[in-house]
Structure formats: C-alpha cells, structure tokens
Amino acid sequence: MKQALALPAALLLAALSAEAAEKPNIILIYADDLGYGDVGCYGATAVKTPHVDRLATEGLRLTGGYSAAATCTPSRYALMTGEYAFRKKGTGILPGDAAMILPTGRATLPSILRKAGYATGIVGKWHLGLGAGGALIDWNGEIKPGPREAGFAESFIMAATGDRTPCVYIDGGKIAGLSPSDPIAVSYGKPFPGEPTGVSERDRLKMDWSHGHNNAVVNGIGRIGFSRGGKSALWKDEDMADTFTRKGVGFIERHREHPFFLYFATHDIHVPRVPHARFVGTTTMGPRGDAIVQFDACVGELLATLDRLELAANTLVILTSDNGPVLDDGYKDDAVRKLGGHRPAGPLRGGKSSIWEGGTRVPFVVRWPARVKPGVSDAIVSQVDLCSTLAALCGQTLAPDDAPDSINVLPALLGDSPEGREHVLEHAGKVAIRKGPWKFIPGAEKGGKPASTKPAEKGGDALYDLSKDAAETTNLAGQHPEVAEQLSKELEHLRERGRSRD
Ligand code: NG6
Ligand code: CA
C-alpha cells in the first residue's frame, strides 16, 4: 500500500478504476411485491427505509425500471432467461410442487455469469418449479433440476412462496433440517387425512385468511397446498428474513476473494407478512409496513457486510422488485385498514397483477461506487435486460437464441446514457407496450378474442401519455388514433417475431 501511495494520484485512480471496471461483484436484491412507492427514495414517508435510500443516494435511481410481468413466476422467468414469459406456456404463478420451468441447456442469468468466472449463488425465493413436478419430486432425497441446474453453484431457497407448501428451506437440493424418521409429503390435490387445515383450525390461527390460504397449517398460519410431516424442517416465518440474510452474508464472506454473483430474493414483503418481533409495530401500517422495515434492515445487513469486507466500491448492487404492490393478498393482516396516506404504487395506477404501470414499474436502484455516478435516470429498462446487460459487463457473448428479449442497457445502468430501451412490454395476463411517453393497452387480444378486462379499462384500446398522466387516467386512444395504431402494430410485431433483440 505504501508503494501505491507513492504513485501519482491520477495514475493510482486510473489503475483502480480499470481494475474495478473489469469484474465487479454483483448482488441482485430482489424484493417480492414491493411497490414503486413503498420506499423512501421513491416518495414513501410513512415507512422509513434508510438502507434502500442510502443505496439510491450513493447510486443511480431509475424511474423507468420495470419487472417483466405483474406477478412473481413470469417476472422471475424473464429475469432468469431474458425471454418474456408470455412467449412460454406454463409460466403463470406456480404451485409449490410444480416442475422446473427454466430450460436447462440454455443461457440463464446465473449460467452467463458462471461462464464469466463468477461464483454464483441464490438465497431466497425461487418459484420457478423443481424437479419433474408433483409426485415425481423427491422431497426427502435430492431435489433436481432446480437452481443448481440453472446455473447457481450454491443455493438456499424456498420452493415457491411463503404462503405455499412445502414450508421448508432447500439447501443445495436437499431440504434443510429434515429428519429421516419424519419424512415430508406435499400435495396440491387431496388433503392428508387427519392433518389440521386452515378451515378446521381457523379459530386458532396466528393470522386469519381472507381468501384461499386455508389448506395446510404451518407455524399457526394457513397456506396454499397441503403437507404432512417434516416437522423439524418447517420454517418459522418470523425468522425467515434473518435466515436468508445470514445465508447471504455467509455467501459474500466465502467468496470475498473472487468475483461473485448473489441473487438475494427476499420473501418480504409477500404474504404472509410475519416479521420478526423486533420489527413489529415499527410502523403504523401493521405487518405490511413492518415487513418493509424488515426488508430494509436486510438490505442494511448486506451493505454493512460489503463495507466490513471492503468490497463496497467494486460491488454492483441492483435492487428491484418482482412486481407491484398488493394490500389484501389473502390474509387479514390489516394492510388495507392501516394504510393511512401511504401510496404503495406512488403516483402510479394499479398494482400487483395489473396491466397498469403500478403492476410492473418498480423501484430500481443501481449502486457501484467505483463506476456508477450517483443520480436519477428516466431511462426505460426492464429486468428482462439483465441477461444481456450483465453479459456485456463481463465480456460474455450470447448465442443468437439466448435471452431473446434481453436488450443490453449497460450504458443506462451505468448512468452513462439517459437512454435505455426504446420500448418495453408489460405483462399481466394481457400484454401492453410502453414506448417513450406512450403506453398502449390493447382492448382485445390477438385474433380478436376479447381480452380479460379485469385489470384494464373495459372495452376498446387504451392509450396514455405517461409524461403528463403517470396515473393513466385519461384515455387518449380516440384523440391519437395514429399513435394507438402504430403501437398496436409494434406490439403485434414484437409478439410475432418471438424476440426483441437483433
Ligand atoms: C395468488 C395468491 C396470493 C399470492 C399470489 C402469488 C390466493 C387467493 N392468492 O394465487 O396470495 O400467493 O398467488 O404471488 O391464493 S406472487 O408474488 O408469487 O406472484
Ligand atoms: Ca411477487
């Protein structure tokens, strides 16, 4: 170090940034159901998120960052494969015993980085299916294919969601803490005779359900799907965030000497929202607000680890969410009653499952102190772009059929360019297109079949000018038929072409 200090400062800086620019560590913090307006740096005041805000202050905060879909599985499918999920059947919200839906043998985000020499690991929510599905999953033996076959050298996951069985952690393909004398069984068909359910136990539940979530009872909470046995392996919801954080920190510590990619996919702030006791009551919003504080604390732990290991400068941290916000998602946890003035989607309309901006426009923050200049950017980027973008960052070339919808938006993510992608598709049952300020939602799906009108406007096409009308209140399709027509054609073209990139 003494010698280095003797170098002229400019030379030293150049040497450092050249090295830094080569292969940063990458941490992708992927929240669940965290809305555009749920964190301080995007306008929340009723909940404090100092750690997320710190990331934004020290990095680039994007106002046009999108998840590829408005629910979890299709979003994650697109994130991992660089392909919009609407192109592939069977990518809707999966049950906990679904077969793995990621293609093995094709590039995935982790396989791209692994090829580039990265130590790859996933901690947290998977929700992309495991093994051959159903009765073919060997829950008491080795569970594969899964994240490891998709390119993660290390994995510590939950199979699907916090509200779906099996309620266990899977560590490197095996259920953690399972005792051979008490094997686990999982069913998404028939209940197990004699096992308590959310109906039979309703009066004794820790948190009542409002719809669904009344099959198996685990940790006093009703779930979707049945399970029996495996008692020693069942998670405690209250400890989940700490468990994942400990695993994430351990991964960083183990790989501190090498470039690493950590996909840290939290359960927060998905239902059931059961934060640890130390977060209960930290907001006036009940469990949903407290879960945001817990999420922020996990972010804080990861950032503190980078600081402690002196890895912060050369670690690219990307923080985003798999889809927009939801209040009542099946449990009576007071999310609606205690909302107060908080706006989970900020100024945007809609939320989780919806085709409106609130469904897919999410917090999107990028920090890399050695390379990214702090600021705010309106560039449009989608999570489907991370395959191409991170490939470009590490000098990897994609095969023509890999990641077909993934555009290299590296200049936008690094803050070098105010331009991201030209257009982005938003998927919530139907598919909408945003191009520049314009957002077009088709009223009818391909082939003239009437589209599901649930999340969108009833009848006819919808066109909004997001630069003046972020909340999508005024349908301009009648006023600007030529714009609507043009976007409709582009959307159709992108669907038919089967890919977005050249
Ligand atoms: C829905 C669940 C909801 C949530 C969602 C998946 C009911 C009534 N609703 O089917 O609670 O689990 O699926 O969320 O069961 S996601 O973020 O993983 O897509
Ligand atoms: Ca989600």
Image: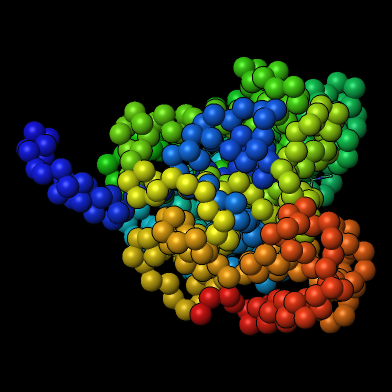
Q: Is residue 223 visible?
A: yes
Which residue is more in the foreground, 74 or 199? Answer: 74
* x and y, in percent, of residue 190 in the image: 84, 46
Residue displayed at 88% across by 40% down: 211
Residue 269 position (above or below residue 21): above
Q: Quadrant of the N terminus?
A: top left
Residue 336 position (above or below residue 94): above
Q: Is residue 225 left or right of residue 448?
A: left
* x and y, in percent, of residue 476 in the image: 83, 68
Give the quarter of the image for residue 9: top left
Which residue is more in the foreground, 119 or 59? Answer: 59
Q: Is residue 291 visible?
A: no
Residue 440 position (above or below residue 327): below
Give the quarter of the image for residue 215: top right
Residue displayed at 65% across by 69% down: 435
Q: Is residue 258 left or right of residue 184?
A: left
Q: Is residue 210 left or right of residue 414?
A: right
* x and y, in percent, of residue 12 in the image: 16, 45
Residue displayed at 17% across by 47% down: 10
Give the quarter of the image for residue 291: top right
Which residue is more in the foreground, 214 or 493? Answer: 493
Residue 228 position (above or below residue 131): above
Residue displayed at 18% across by 50% down: 15
* x and y, in percent, of residue 154 in the image: 44, 46
* Number of disc labels: 0
